[in-house]
Amino acid sequence: MSISRREFLKGALAGGTLLATGAPAEARENKTMPDEALGLLYDSTLCIGCKACVSACKEVNNMPPEFSTPEHLWDTPLDISGKTLNVIKVYQDGNSQTKDSEKDGFAFMKVSCLHCVDPSCVSACPVSAMTKDKVTGIVGYDKSICIGCRYCVAACPFGVPRFQYDTPVPQISKCQLCRHRIPDGQYAGCAQVCPTGATLYGKVKDLHAEAKRRLALKPGEETQFPRGNINTHDQSSHTAKAAKYLPEIYGEKELGGTQMLKLSAVPFEKLGMPKLPEQSYAAKSETMQHTLYGNALAIPLAFLGVLTYVAKRNVKHDDDADDEKK
Amino acid sequence: MNDDTIENEKSMVALEKRLDISRRTFMQMCAAMAATMGLPKSAEAAIAKAVATKQRPSVIWLQFQECTGCTESLLRAEHPAIDKLILDIISLDYHETLFAAAGHQADAARKSAMKAHKGKYILVVEGAIPTKDNGIYCKIGGQTAIELLKECAADAAAVIAIGSCASWGGMPSTPPNPTGATSVSEILGKVVPNIPGCPPNPYNFLSTVVHFLTFGKLPDVDEKGRPKFAYSRLVHENCERRAHFDAGRFAMEFGDDGHKKGYCLYKLGCKGPETYANCPAILFGDVGNASWPVGTGHPCIGCTEKGIVFTKPIHALADLKTMRPPVGFPRVVEEQGIGATLGAAVLTAAVAGAAVGAGMQLAKNLGKDVKLDESEPAKKEERNPS
Amino acid sequence: MSAAHNHPAPAPLGGPLWTPTTKILAALVALAGVILLVRFIFGLGAVTNINDGYTWGIWVVYDVVIGSAFACGGYSVALLVYIFNKGEYHPMVRPALLASLFGYTLAGAGVIFDLGRYWNFWHIFWPGYAQPNSVMFEVAVCISAYIVVMWIEFSPAFLEKFGKKDTKKKLNKVLFFLIALGTVLPSMHQSSLGSLLVVFGYQVHPLWQSILLPLFYLMTAITIGFAIVVFEACLSSAGFKRPLEMHLLGKLSKVMLWTLAAYLAIRFVDLAVRGALGNMFALNIEAFMFWVETALFVAPLVILSNAQARKNPAKLFIAACSLIMAGFILRINSFLVGYETGPGWHYFPSVSEIMVSIGMIALEILGYIVLVRYLPILSGNNEASAVATNK
């Protein structure tokens, strides 16, 4: 017996429809953030571009200097890379006179891992080298497991994981929120040295509350800004005037949320933070995979069953013919 | 030698006698003065000539709500030293602190000087002027500061406000400003040259006066009346610790490791990023290197700026006034990666070309040379029995 | 019903192994080997232009994604012969299978030298490490399984050569299962090579990003598979001076055209439904490359529109080439041209990077030539075999 052309087309159409609709029964929701998730609050209006965080990050993570000038005099990274986990970038417009002004002004943006709630890199990694901690939610990397396929580099919507192309024993490079310092009772180096509290460390729920508090202030209103760790209050806060914030917390909903939240007075897109939908790409990709291969490979196995039957019939006759001939 | 030169020579000799310094020292002074004002080298000669030949201008110096710090600062100038040079370069016809006389005698000296040099004297004002309750909070010789200022300013050739108090109100105007202390410019209704600072560097004042003396007009000023040669740049822009700021090295507390190493004092409240002054360039006190607040390890308090000193807490963090990023500050979009090199493009084109060429050749051949399988029709019949 | 065996049995082609052609191919392979040595000593950056903006360059996109698609000849012909029981295509099976075998094995090898930490490669199969949610996991496991299946499927050729008739008979008893596997596995991973892109989200241009990517990649893989068979048949015919089985190829091309038409229909309906059609008319490189891709897909439909044209070997060959290039460009577009992690990144393969891919192709062709001469693969219509091939 063979499948007629008609039957084949019917089957193909059915299969295609199945794929196209993505079988909602299998849809995976965005992952949710652990209660005690740790993260950062980066306030672009407080940032003065001093790069203490860039310097501190290199020190606590033992990263080498990166040179972008002909004289290799000091660490001048232009972007995160295999040697740099964190940089501050500047936005400039017109004569760059006024801080946090979109026109004729300048503003800063911290570029480092956002520790997504539903990370694309964790979903993409075929060997579980990228993992999300169940308690802290920190997205960690283990080079002893990594195969260097760089799927995470390509998948991350923020372009965070970077790779070391200049060595025969490369690894992926990205901020891990200084999780190696937690056993010593320390926390993220960037937050620890920030002189203005632009980078603040702590439990995401508390950082979120602080972000909301700032957005509720009137521009120019004097207020206390905490520094260092918002939960342990290890550093004094300082008084300054609230800026004219955009009424938006970046990372609140983007792709299911991130554990590094950002505030700014200049539109986020101009600072390199793209507009993103709420459904995470990991959820989209995994829903598709589960639809096709879920339920212990139900669909492929069904196909295999049918094809085995058909092939058996056809191949058997060939062999019989062969034997008869001989 | 022409007449002019002979005249110069005579003047120089007279000057040397008058000031009791060598010509060499005098020329060095003029050179330093020119440098402070950012004038070209040729200005030295002009300054020297002006100082040597011109009549010493009369200067009337008024003091109102002030601490006399500006005068004290001037007293500590070395080049020219005030006792030798300033009192001889200019004719200080009224100065309450430095005068031996007092009371009615001093007052009389002022009035006669004003009469004698009407329209030609320079009025220097030190201290703020109270305006509350008709200005009774500062009276000298029965007159309020407002009256005195207006009277003296009326016949002056130029008015210079020295110190933050005279420039914008200074310490007396610290909120809630109970006496209504205001600046000279506000009382007179026009922007006069201001030399803010608490105290200002004496050379900023001296250079301004010498400029006037030499060129007959005051140096270029900004919209607040501050000479641009001294107040057009932020302290932050010329600070010797700027590299530490740019590299993120800060002193966190007085006496800590970073502080001992001379790191940036931003986190201790340095107002350098929002204060216009030339302190890091010319320093204070002529005692050499690092003789200014930041150099000694204390954050700048922004003493020239209204709204900063006496208003913002000393240890509150400064706002960044102007962004002049270091050349290497990473931008949001940086060009990265290698696009097509000549070699790669040529190779790709060659491979593509060869493939297309071979393909076309093969297609041509297929049309002509290849034999079709002649046994095919026979097979076809065999295969379709029905 | 299966009257597939009225053609001569496969036999080694014979003839000289060292010809100018094989010598040049060997040289290209050697050069690629040297470059790879440099890669292993100094790192990927030493011989490629890949960077963090374009971290998958042509070693992944060509060698693996496109290379494996080109290797779908075996898949498509097996589908025809063993599933749709078109026994008349039987003589095409072994050569197609050989090309597939080489294509996939080299794609697998290509993966190894692109991996940064290749010594951990086995983690992808190891329980505890393997992460089944990842599309790449599924691609890797499927491709590896398929390579094994193909080597087994191909073993009859070896067994015949070495006269192991009994082993061959035993193998034949389970061949049907392997064939079924050899149809399911490529369906899975060829579609998943498209699924890889879904997690990239907005980074893939709307002209290519779609939830139907797996379907597009699968349909084009099948279509290219047929085109490859035509292409290789023409090449073999010209190269080894053998007659061209036009009857078979003509019929094959008809199947190919139907699958192509179905693909194009779904592709454009998808673009319309997603509201992405407008992007075609933008003035940028993405729109331009989209037109190139579409033109290459549509051309065969035009060229082979009538039965007469389908009897013309030259037209058949050109149409097959166009289709192969279309599949190539579709993958280049979705992974490279239409991929942007952010502004400011540039990538074009370096000379050494290109030479390695060329070396891989050379190895494939060289291997094909050598094995076809040495093993019973091509069916015995080889009168002018020995002297004829001196290109």
Image (cartoon, coloured by chain):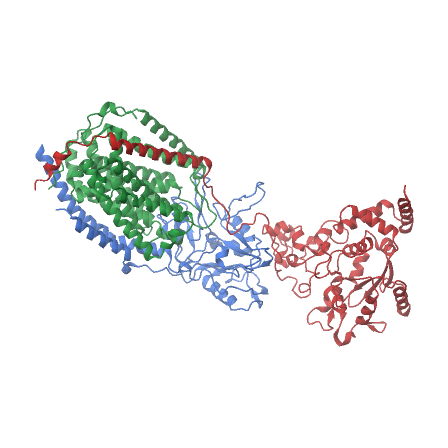
Chain colours: A blue, B red, C green
Q: Looking at the image, is B42 positioned above or below residue B300?
A: above
Lateral position of residue C252 relative to residue A39, left or right: left
Where residue A65 sits in the image (x, y, percent)?
Answer: 53, 44
Quadrant holding the C terminus of chain B: top left
B4 up-or-down from B322: above or below = above
Please identify the quarter of the rendering in which residue A324 is found.
top left
Image coordinates of residue C369 in percent, x first then y, are 27, 30
Instruction: Tell me if residue A186 can be seen.
Output: no
Extreme residue in the bottom direction: B133
Q: In this view, does C362 lie to the left or right of A273?
A: left
Rendered image quadrant of residue C377: top left
Q: Taking B95 as reference, is A170 above or below it?
A: above
Q: Identify the residue at horizontal 79%, vertical 64% (top origin).
A: B126
Between B243 and A8, which is closer to the camera in this rendering?
A8
User: Going by the image, does B321 lie left or right of C45?
Assistant: right
| Residue placed most toward the observer, B332 or A132 | B332
Residue A310 rendering spot, x and y as whole percentages: 15, 46
Of residue C209 and residue A256, the one placed in the foreground of this image is C209
Residue C83 in the image: x percent, y percent?
18, 44
Q: Across the whole image, how many numbered discs are drawn on residues?
A: 0
Residue A71 shows in the view: yes
At 47% across and 41% down in the image, what residue appears?
B338
